[in-house]
Amino acid sequence: MSPFDREPGQIKASYTAHHVIEAIGQRLTKPLTFMEVCGTHTVSIFRSGIRSVLPPDLSLISGPGCPVCVTDQGEIDCAINLLDMPDITMATYGDMLRVPGTRGSLSERKSEGKDVRLITSAAQALSIAEDNPEREIVFLAVGFETTAPATAATILEAAEKNITNFSILVYHKQTPPVLEQLVKDPDLKINGFILPGHVSVILGHKAYRFLADHYGVPCAIAGFEPMDILLAIADLVFQHSNGESALHSLYPRAVRPEGNQKALDLISKVFTPCSARWRGLGLIPSSGYALKEEFAAFDALLRFGITIPTPKPPAGCCCGDVLAGHITPLKCPLFAAACTPMTPVGPCMVSSEGSCSAYYKYNRGG
Ligand code: SF4
């Protein structure tokens, strides 16, 4: 039950945005900083102007919720280096193509004649493998709990069809472990999390409860409409004024408390948790997905005997600090100068969900 239900005299979910903003102002009794974890939330917050209507004592910071942005520099370089091997076709999602690596981007390698394909689904990568048996198709798989089930389903299909020219660079990441790292960061003071609605559709409520129960940080699961986000912000403010720390779902129309069991089963059938390296956040235990032993034939690292090189982030790029919530993009000396959406230096300017891209489009003046 959310505070909106418990305190109908003060605020109701059916009120207008104006009422919700007013209630936030009335119930805010001290400076608070909330983190919106998800890149889609970041963009929605900027696009709708939510920051501009919040009280000055209420700050929002963006977290590491853009899958393209958190993919480590070493992981990008590994994919680019793999194209040096014969007969490789690399298939991946849109924004990954433009992320600069140490030796250019996948898009630049494509313009040099390498076979790099833009895909919109994991299943499409497998179709390319079926249609091109003479080539080695490598699917560069990124994303959180939302995209990992589709990758798992594709692996199962590839195994069932005995497709032998298909492998994956598994760069998927898990959300709860990175949130735990953020609440433990002594340089950050997060008073509440606005949690991603789509990841929560898969995970349900349980996976985040430790944030409120163990670390005392209020949490609100939010949808992606501006009103969804405003209600989540109000919920967090209400929790503070009530002296509570709980996990509330403000997105019950999509998120079931138990999550999506079918998707979770797919993930656990194919993957096992492993440490993963996040851009700017380093190696985080149990925050990645490794293929289980029975699917090792689809592991591109094993198949081609390669390792992920030590990351060498672009000179001057502060994406790591932006993703860790330590600075806003405005503090990066390259922002809107050497680094723009047309000439991105780091992934946070490449991705449509990246903080730097959102600041550039909607908040260049600060
Ligand atoms: Fe990196 Fe560019 Fe953002 Fe600076 S402005 S942190 S260089 S993406």
Image (cartoon, rainbow, N blue to C red):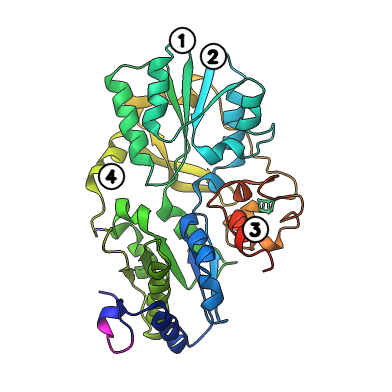
Q: Is mark 2 within 8 Å of ligand 1?
A: no
Q: Is mark 3 within 8 Å of ligand 1?
A: yes
Where's residue 97, x and y in %? 57, 35
Report if residue 180 lies within the magenta region.
Answer: no
Q: Quadrant of residue 293?
A: top left
Please say whether residue 360 is visible from this viewpoint.
yes
Quadrant of the snapshot with the N terminus: bottom left
Q: Nearer the viewer, mark 2 or mark 3?
A: 3
In the image, 305: left or right of 259? right
Q: Quadrant of residue 95?
A: top right
Q: Which label number is shown at residue 311?
A: none
Q: Residues within 10 Å of mark 3 (few under 14, many from 20)?
A: many
What residue lies at 60% left-to-right and 62% top-to-bottom?
362
Q: Amino acid at mark 3?
A: Tyr
- Per the image, the residue denoted by label 1 is 134
In the image, 41: left or right of 111? left
Among numbered discs 2 and 1, the one appearing first in the sequence: 2
Location of residue 261 with respect to 256 vertically, above or below:
above
- Per the image, the residue denoted by label 4 is 264
At numbered mark 2, what does the secondary structure look like: helix, strand or loop? loop
The answer to whether mark 2 and mark 1 are in CB contact below 8 A is yes
Q: Nearer the viewer, mark 1 or mark 4?
A: 1
Q: Which residues are magenta?
A: 6-10
The answer to whether mark 4 and mark 2 are in CB contact below 8 A is no
How far apart are the alpha carbons under marks 2 and 3? Answer: 39 Å
Q: Which label number is shown at residue 87?
A: 2
Q: Amino acid at mark 2?
A: Asp
At numbered mark 4, what does the secondary structure look like: helix, strand or loop? helix
Location of residue 56 with respect to 92 vertically, above or below:
below
Is residue 210 or residue 175 the one in the foreground?
175
- Per the image, the residue denoted by label 3 is 360
